[in-house]
Image (cartoon, rainbow, N blue to C red):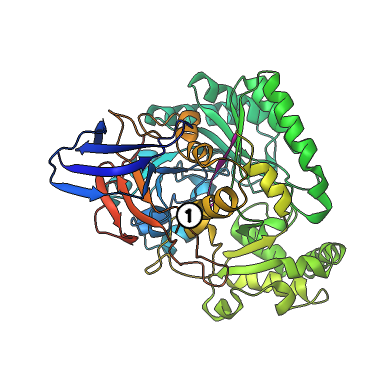
Amino acid sequence: MELFIKDALLIDGTGKPSFQSNIGIEGEKIIYIGKETFAAKRVIEAKELIVTPGFIDTHSHSDFTILADPRAEGKITQGITTEINGNCGVSPFPLSGEAFDRRITEINSLGLKPWKTIEQYIDLLKKANPSINLAFFCGHGNIRGSVIGYKNVKANRKQLSVMKNLLKKHFFYSIKGLSTGLIYPPGMFAEREELIELSKIVAKYGGLYTTHMRSEGEKLFSALEETLSIGKEAKIPVHISHIKTSGRENWWKIDSLLSIIEGAQKEGLKITCDRYPYTASSTDLDAFLPSWIVEGSREDIIKRLKNSKVRKQIKKYLKSKGESFLKSLLISDTAFHSDKKFEGKSLGELTNLENAADFIADLLIRSNLRVGAIYFGMKEENLIKILSKPYVMIGTDSSAKSSNGITAHGKPHPRGFGSFPRFLRRYVLEKNIIKIEEAIEKITALPAKIFKIEKRGLIKEGYFADLVIMDLNEIEDTATFEEPFKIAKGIKYVIVNGSVTVEDGTLSDIRKGQILL
């Protein structure tokens, strides 16, 4: 036997009470669970420690960063052994036409060799040899961007046929389904009928429709209605990304939101959600701009941002939102070196309502639109209601980064290093919103079932040995908005496909992740 874990308290992912046991591992698989002791090349003494299946990050954006830095330090040190990527309509394939043009700046900034097809991406990923397992959705934004571009037009019959055929091709590589990002271009330009027709293709292959809905605030209910109608019309399971009620004026919608979802479940629609355990979100700075500004190429958008009339429109919008909006928006990352001094500061600290439109437009222009932002706009009470639901899983909504190297820049959201320990410490152990056994099931077996990740998510003989060994007395996130690259406490060992990848909380050089395609 290669690896033997002795005297552990197992929480096996089934939701059942914990139990004392030993675990035997040979190669990539668990071959023994029980009380007997066996000789092994390596023995881990796990007395007073908890052993769980490896955590599954149901909403990740590591599609590009994992090639640049396959260590994925922030993810694996918090216990994540498997990621679901290709979310919010953005995946690493296909990349042709305007979809390629939109991504080439990011690809170049990471020092990567460009690619266009899923075959080319898989080859690069194999060479990168990541530390974690990776599964993927195909992004609707990639499909539409490759065929139609970033124009605000309705797909005609021929274009829709080309998109369908392009989507079909990717199911030969066991993608998990189709993702949409309907607040981002080009997804925001797609009509409901287009999404239904593409989802019908996904349904034929047994995939999921996962969505960053068209609104998470002011038009939340109409966005939810659209999402549910796509699920019903296409006869496909639906997964809502990072479910929330964003903006103080929308906090009151939480109970109705959950009630509508649960009503749809009772009617037979398969619907699940994910969420990160924070009340601040993070996305691109230009995400709040109206759709007519972000239509077309980068050059088109930058040209508009230079226009004085456009700036007046932005100014008018910002004034309607008030000073509180500026104070709630933090600049997390900027590509223009001289603007690095703004990272970690709110717009309220950097400018005022009179000058904010010019400040934002100039900032975006200097960084070629590559500016990240953190939005503080959610309520803790609502977050607790969401996290306590049995159909809500945990997703970091973050790309894999490390505390040093090419991905260690800016002041990104701390969820990239702290989401899962934070969920366990703050919401399970301290606030007791659910039992620890239910919490472990929520971050292991449930996502494995929903996303059809075979032989993972449980501690079971014959399953892949993806395991987390932790001290529940110590488990805690340490990453903050001021210091987002700090490693979580309490994760003693992380085992990926039978190999110890994290030991005593420190990342090793061993990388045994698999591409789940």
* Residue 59 point in image, percent of width and height: 52, 45
**Quadrant of the image containing the C terminus:** top left
**Residue 515 magenta-highlighted:** no
Quadrant housing residue 27: top left
* Residue 452 point in image, percent of width and height: 44, 28
Circle 1 residue: 399
**Residue 394 magenta-highlighted:** yes
In this orientation, does residue 109 appear?
yes
Using the image, determine if residue 408 lies above or below residue 439. Answer: below
In the figure, is residue 480 to the left or right of 388? left
Neighbourhood count class around disc 1 (C-alpha, 10 Å): few under 14, some 14–19, many 20 upward: many
- Residue range (magenta): 391-397
Which residue is more in the foreground, 178 or 454? 454
Using the image, determine if residue 230 lies above or below residue 64. Answer: above
Which residue is more in the foreground, 362 or 65? 65
Q: Secondary structure at mark 1?
A: loop
What amino acid is labelled 1 in the image? Ser
Q: At 38% across and 69% down in the image, what residue appears?
A: 404
Quadrant housing residue 190: top right
* Residue 108 point in image, percent of width and height: 42, 62
In the figure, is residue 303 to the left or right of 509? right
Which residue is more in the foreground, 124 or 327? 327
